Image (cartoon, rainbow, N blue to C red):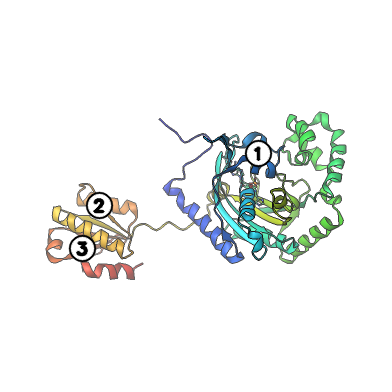
Amino acid sequence: MYKAPRGTADILPEEQGYWRFVEDRAIALCRLYGYQRLDTPAFEDSQLFTRSIGEGTDIVTKEMYTFKDRSGNILALRPEGTAPVCRAYIEHGMDNLPQPVKLYYLAAIFRYERPQAGRYRQHYQFGFEAIGDADPALDAEVIEMTWQFFKSLGLEHLFLYINSIGCKACRPRYLEGLKRYYSAHLAGLCSDCKARFGKNPLRLLDCKKPTCYDVAEEAPKSTDYLCRECKMHFEAVVGYLDALRLPFDISHRLVRGLDYYTKTVFEIQPLGEGAQSALGGGGRYDDLIEELGGKPTPAIGFAAGMERVVLNLKKHKTPVPNLPAAQVFIAHLGDEAKLEAVKLASTLRRDGIAAIMATGDRSLKGQLRQADSIGSSYVAIIGEDEVKSGVVTLRNMMTGEQKTVSAEKLKDFLESKR
Ligand code: HAM
């Protein structure tokens, strides 16, 4: 017996209603804010990711699906969506377009993580990136767009955390201060944090272990070390968010798990969840395009984890629209009737009406039961008499009412009931 690989999941037909709902809202939001869709390959040169996400990060050191293809190229299944979008921006000369270029994606993401609720080895992200503008008003717009996304889904009780982690100019001084502070607390930290101290001190701040939490709470704050430009930028972002009346908190421990961020970072957390709970996160990455070989180009973006969004919708019993079933089910009795049913189904579909024809040799009762379980509103029944007179008996599955309709009129009738 084969099973889906550990950490992956089938999205079954009965769950598709949630997924379509979230995707539809995401696409509608992108239209409102002027974002265009970009689809990139599921795998890329692995160096694209090691260079952008950072050599010392968990994603690069432990979680990438890296493989050599038959020509010896070292490739990786994408562990995130931002670097591929930047690669495409550079490759297709999008710096020649009016800036910022606004792009979004809905894509499968691969990370070799320890599976648990809301954490998978293949998950889907809805992400969007605004590339080519350093204006703090754009940070506020991206953060507001994120907030509107969750509101449009009907998700409540969310927390929006923001922070600024500075830039190339001011971060080194902050990291020094952080290391100075942490060197006095090293003995009491968890083993992961002891390793982070040398490799990636910023990540010390988001350790969720009780031993490390209190130490992180008292740690120096990045916002106290910002250079003039980063400080002004952050104040402007906060000013715009206040003007938009967004309910945000400044979290000094918010640093994010990827190395490319500069200045503004932000995350959406649901109420009362644990370590793996972020519904989405993002931030500025003003140096990334240049690091990948493009011109210096500021940018900002966000991505949400679709599975976590769907889990939250289910948890809060948020109603989502049902996916429409085929409008009409065609039942038949006898060989001649079956031939008519085959033709009728084909004609209806060509006319744009969703129709399902009974196959196999179920009794009429069995066919009606099947129509009921599919959820069709009408059943067109064709028996010997109907064949002779060129009509169908149309049954309304809600009321049980039946009437005779000529085969030609059937399309008009069904269209009028859509
Ligand atoms: P990230 O925080 O690594 O950011 O991932 C974004 C979201 O994807 C997370 O907040 C979470 O909801 C979801 N997610 C991450 N890993 C998993 C997993 N193993 N299973 C299920 N869901 C997961 C990024 O990837 C950045 N590229 C976001 C970004 C866009 N920054 C700027 N632009």
Indicate the quadrant containing the C terminus: top left, top right, bottom left or bottom right: bottom left
Provide the residue designation for mark 2. Answer: 358
Judge left or right: residue 197 versus residue 407: right
The label on residue 114 is none
Provide the residue designation for mark 1. Answer: 59
Judge left or right: residue 282 versus residue 37: right
Which residue is rendered at x = 22% and y = 69% of the image?
A: 408
Near-viewer residue (122 or 368): 122
Q: Earlier along the polypeptide chain: callout 1 or callout 3?
A: 1
Hey, what amino acid is under mark 1? Ile
Judge left or right: residue 266 versus residue 214: left
CA separation, marks 1 and 2? 50 Å
For label 2, the SS is loop
Q: Earlier along the polypeptide chain: callout 1 or callout 2?
A: 1
Evaluate whether residue 130 shows in this view.
yes
- Check contact, mark 2 vs mark 3: CB within 8 A: no
Which residue is rendered at x = 18% and y = 56% of the image?
A: 339
Residue 88, horizontal then vertical, whole percent: 61, 53
Which residue is rendered at x = 42% and y = 48% of the image?
A: 13
Res 140 quadrant in image: bottom right
Q: Tell us which disc is closer to us: 1 or 2.
A: 1
Indicate the quadrant containing the N terminus: top left, top right, bottom left or bottom right: top left
Which residue is rendered at x = 82% and y = 48% of the image?
A: 222
Near-viewer residue (392 or 256): 256
Provide the residue designation for mark 3. Answer: 393
Residue 111, horizontal then vertical, whole percent: 59, 39
